[in-house]
Image: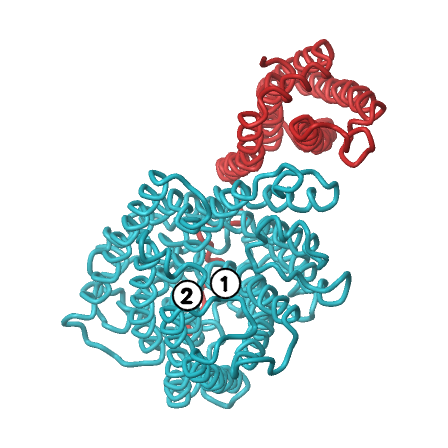
Chain colours: A red, B cyan
Amino acid sequence: MEHTSGFVLPNSGHSRDDEASKLGMWLFLFTELLLFGGLFIVYMVYRMLNHESFLLSSFELNVGLGSFNTVVLLVSSMTIAMAITAVQKGEQQKAVRLLVTTLALSFVFLVVKYFEWSAKIHHGLFPGMDYYNGLPKGESLFFFLYFIMTGLHALHIIIGAVIIAVVIARTRKGLVNKDKYALAENAGLYWHLVDLIWIYLFPLFYLIH
Amino acid sequence: MSSVSTNLNFFEAKKGIFSWIFSVDHKRIALLYLYSLITFFLVGVTLGLLMRYELLNPGKDLVEAKTYNQIFTLHGVIMIFLFIIPSIPAVFGNFFLPIMLGTDDVSFPRLNLLSWWVYVVGALMALSTLVFGDGPADTGWTFYAPYSVKTGTNVTMSVLAAFVLGFSSILTGLNFIVTIHRLRAPGMTFLKMPLFAWSLYATSWIQLLATPIVGITLLMIAAERLLGVGLFDPSIGGDPILYQHLFWIYSHPAVYIMALPAFGVISEMLPTFSQRTIFGYKAIAFSSLAIAFVGYFIWGHHMFTSGMSGTARFIFSILTFLVAIPTAIKVFNWVATLYKGSINVQPPLLYTLAFIFQFMIGGFTGLVLGALATDIHLHDTYFVVGHFHYVMFGGTGFAFFGALHYWYPKIWGRMYNIKVANVAFTIFFIGFNMLYFPMLIAGLMGMPRRYYDYLPEFHLPNMISTYGSWVLATGLIIMLSNLVAGFFGKKPKVGRNPWNGITLEWQTLSPPPVQNFDRMPVLPQNGPYDFDHKPVIEE
């Protein structure tokens, strides 16, 4: 047996590959879309079957707060996109400021969501509560879907916020920089997806009549 | 990390349990999967033997009706989610995909380790229903509503386990797609990839795009049980048919997650044991993608009797028949590969031939079930059970054990006893057909599935089937002990290429070194199965 020491494969799974990590993130986003897709199908079917009560229930939601949160998320998507551009240009400080803004906006979203949810729960609209159990079928389905879909979305916001916090820490240390920014880009991709899902949730629950 | 090169094989490189369970080496992760899978497989087999024993005679032999329901549910959950979905991709895909592509690992080695850990957590959750709560679910592995919402058994934990296991499956699929795109050896284009890699590529896409739907559906079952919302239970306003649709949107493509990797393994073993190029390389490669694609649109054939419009049934039936075309293309190409080859009859080839024979029975009975009129008669009979086991066990199961015999010398660097392996195969093969063929007949006679009891006229096929299960178990025990004995035995080490194979894994040492290759792998000139220009492999 001959030994060729120092021999290195050109295509190693352990070497850095930004394209691979972005491809991986895109594939992961597909699975996220399909995860919500299952819920969207259920929403569509039950909306068709219970058109009237879905309409009635949607009046219970606060369109003002919903619109505010939509703007918050859209702006946060913009700030994270600007942060990535800043990183690519080598403007670390500016990038950190923009990322912190994004993180702050995600908190704003969650706080507004918290007040919206508490108001509904205060009215006894959470699944399992007495008032909820007395609702007609269509309305109880509406609120169930409202809580499960916005809840799952809020969970994604929280995960996204954690990821952004990690990116902030790494950018400050210079571990994310103009030669190495795949992590920031992936965080951005994820954040845009979370934003995009809200863009569909908002009209489905608050707006369409 | 990869700059230091060593020719220590991957077993010797590090020692201790932690060097295994926290290893990011794809070869070690593959073996972690192998040992856990085989363990769960044996649990599943035991449950299957218990069921067959109960069905030996009409009336109660061993267990109560409810216990029987729990046994077949757990058998299904273990065999589907813990064994056959991860089986070939997680074990042989993990071990050999990077080596066949000429690289040293998958694209995301740490994610790979995570997916094993997620698998273990999911497996423990599934098995915890045996001990905690009100016993394992008794719904069947499909968790059909409304019963899954109403039953007192521990359905919630079972569906959460399936959700977690699905997550593990998604991570593996994602890793493989990126690996195939990014880490092929220089000069290895997509159309010069081994067919095993092609089949894993198609499988991974299904894992990625279908699994999330069943994940969210199962979560909805859990939510409905916990919160009492009428999603699927009609008595509180839900729609049980919607559940069936959502479930099968995933679970039908999932049978291709189980079958496609087996096609890949078969496409590797046939050229090696015929010593000639595979017939119709492109046809086999693209038919995998075609199966993956068409497989998405045929879930409705599980629901012909559930309440669907005539038009929908008609369309689902036609699309079901369409899947038979790419599958038949593969079978014809495999048989044509044997033609004028120098056939070398070894245990892996025997499993391959058994696969083709049994998979054809499974495939044809599938067409019988895909046809509307015959399905009305055969729906929910033992014919379906027989069909499913012919495809999954006779197909994928045999391919799995064939692959184990094929790559055994590469993984452990030793050879098992060939004669004993042949005997074990023969017993296993006879037992398998004794076990499942009578089920097809009992089903045609009208015996319904999922009952712990049956009418006296079904006694004969059930008796043969139960005896068959004992023959099968005997074969399995001999086969596995032979493999274990080969591992501990004093047989001399094998060289790099005991089967005279051509794909890249046969160019490296057995077992492979940590970095997979001790010298630059050489691609054959014209495609992966170019036996006319096989690179010379020096020991």
Label 1 residue SS? helix
Judge whether residue B384 can be spotted in this image.
yes
Distance of label 1 from label 2 (alpha carbons): 8 Å
Q: Is residue B399 visible?
A: no
* x, y percent for residue B212: 55, 42
Residue where numbered disc 2 is placed: B396
Residue displayed at 21% across by 67% down: B335
Q: Quadrant of the C terminus of chain B?
A: bottom left
Residue A91: image x %, image y %?
65, 17
Camera-nearest residue between B69 and B18: B69
**Residue A33's x, y, as percent?**
54, 33
B234 or B170: nearer the viewer: B234
Residue B464 to residue A74: above or below: below
Give the residue type that dot 1 points to.
Answer: Ile
Tag on residue B84?
1
Classify mark 2: residues with Cα within 10 Å, few (<14), some (14-19) or many (20+): many
Of the two numbered discs 1 and 2 on the same chain, state the one appearing first in sequence: 1
- Camera-nearest residue between B308 and B335: B308
Chain letter for mark 2 = B
Tell me if mark 1 has few (under 14), some (14-19) or many (20+) residues whose alpha carbon lies within 10 angstroms of its own. Answer: many
Mark 1 — on which chain does it sit?
Answer: B
Q: Is residue B97 left or right of residue B24?
A: left
Picture coordinates of residue B405, whole percent (x, y): 42, 76
Q: Tell me which amino acid carries mark 2.
A: Thr
Q: From the viewer's perspective, is B411 left or right of B216?
A: left
Q: Is residue A171 left or right of residue B415?
A: right
Q: Are marks 1 and 2 in contact (CB under 8 Å)?
A: yes
Indicate whether B216 appears above or below B461. above
Residue drawn at 39 percent across, 49 percent down: B301
Numbered circle sitting on residue A73? none
